[in-house]
Image: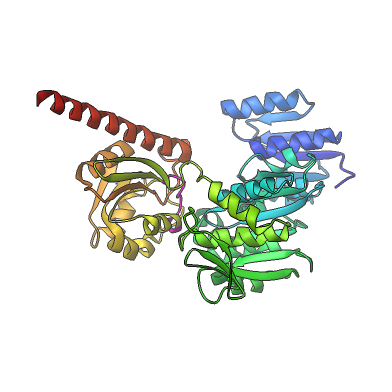
Amino acid sequence: MNDLRTCWVLGLGESGEGAAELLRRESVSVVALDAASSPAILDAAARLEGLGVDARPGATQLPMGAADLCVVSPGIPAEAPWLLACKERGIPIVSELELAWQRRKARVLAVTGSNGKTTLVRLLEQILQRAGLRAAAAGNIGPCLSRVVDQPLDWLVVEVSSFQLEWVKKFRADVGILLNLLPNHLDRHGTMDHYAALKARLFAQAEQHDLCLVEASCMDRVRSQSSGAGHWLSFGAGPDADLRFRQGWIEAGGRAVADLRGTMFDHPVTGPAAVAAWAAARACGVSNDRFEAAIRDFQPLPHRMQAAGRMDGVRYINDSKATNLAAMVAALQRCVGRVHLIAGGLAKENDFLAAKDFLVERAAGVYLIGSASKAMFDAWSADVACQQCGDLETAFSRAAAVAKSGETVLLSPGCASFDQFPGYESRGARFLELVDQRSRFVEEVESAEEAWK
């Protein structure tokens, strides 16, 4: 890639803009295209044009002729007409992740999986920094890898998505983690086999000295789909894992090696992520003392099992980041007592029956919103009390009205948000607003009642 003269960049979001900037620093002639022309895309185009990039928002076709390379943003699916046209013209295609990785100076710690990637990446970044190592998080978490790859760092902690792995060729990690493998993005990838094969690409180029950490339940599947070498270890909460979470401790070789008691990872759902973090940290030279101190100081990220408030003994939890059913089920398992679940949105999968048993066990009621609400209602309502509420405001009002002390009102949609919100962040922010409004209302009622006494 070092002899590039002309490059096309497809997509003007974070990845595309970062890739174009990186290439311009190498004096490559860049044409950057995006079919959209939203204000954000137009702003990115203006910034790139200032750097000498031929930016084309609202583009309908590729440039004439050929280029030395096409860099594709993760939002563009592999079967997109632009990419098919590049293949017909014989133009090599790589992801922004691959482009930046080829220019790395630091070692790479990469994390992929269906749920919990961002939390683990942030945790690892903080663990390494606390140990005095120069580390920065990048990739799918943002910023894109192209923006940080030139920085003087010891470790790049990279969140890697299945979308990014569609177009990698030589990408490898010194330490790679597959956190879990659950149905997700099947609206794009089609089948679990294809989705799993994409995730396995994280390890396809692993070398003998690389550490490959894989959740125990999917180790066999991943090993069968990856030709990489590396030192492979499994982790999890079950007895078959090489490294195990058990009763608040991390165990290795049957011996307790790190204490998670009293932390947010002291739970069978979250504990395996901390086990993977421990193994990765040890591979990076971090001591147990530094690891345990970082774990105890770590705070959950917004919109991920975020405590939103407590009124009349009812807990309110914002888990808007739960955009697939597996994440929704994990949230239900982490709640104490009966749960009033707000679910729905833009579905990324269609087998809603897979979650029914967990709802029967944990849900006092389910309040459905968005475009998936009818399908969810049809799948669950025969066994669980479900209401089609339409929007978040109605669902929240109905759930809060009937929730009793010791119960939880949980926003954990199991779906993407784009049918009703710009993203999961705005959906979670609206939930927090509703909790705050209810809190103020309750305070006003209590004040009025006190005044009448």
Q: Nearer the viewer, residue 304 or 258?
A: 258
Is any atom of residue 316 visible in this view? yes
Q: Nearer the viewer, residue 156 or 379?
A: 156
| Residue at the far front in the pictured view | 289
Colouring method of the image: rainbow
Residue at 27%, 43% in the rendered image = 389
227 is within the stretch colored magenta: no
Q: Nearer the viewer, residue 277 or 294?
A: 294
**Does residue 404 lie above or below 34 as drawn?**
below
Residue at 62%, 51% in the rendered image = 163
What type of secondary structure mainly makes up the magenta span?
loop
Task: Please tell me in which quadrant of the rendered image residue 380 appears.
Answer: bottom left
Region of the chain picked out in magenta, as a range: 319-326
**Does residue 267 lie above or below 313 as drawn?**
below
Tally of numbered tags? 0
Is any atom of residue 77 visible in this view? no
| Residue at the far left in the pictured view | 453
320 is within the stretch colored magenta: yes
Q: Quadrant of the C terminus?
A: top left
| Residue at the far right in the pictured view | 3
Residue at 66%, 28% in the rendered image = 44
Image spot of residue 236 (x, y percent): 54, 68
Task: Please tell me in which quadrant of the rendered image residue 50 appears.
Answer: top right
Image spot of residue 329 (x, y percent): 40, 58
Q: Nearer the viewer, residue 250 or 152?
A: 250
Image spot of residue 204 (x, y percent): 72, 64
Task: Please tell me in which quadrant of the rendered image residue 150 appears.
Answer: top right
Left-right relation of 406 to 103 = left
Image spot of residue 97 (x, y percent): 71, 48
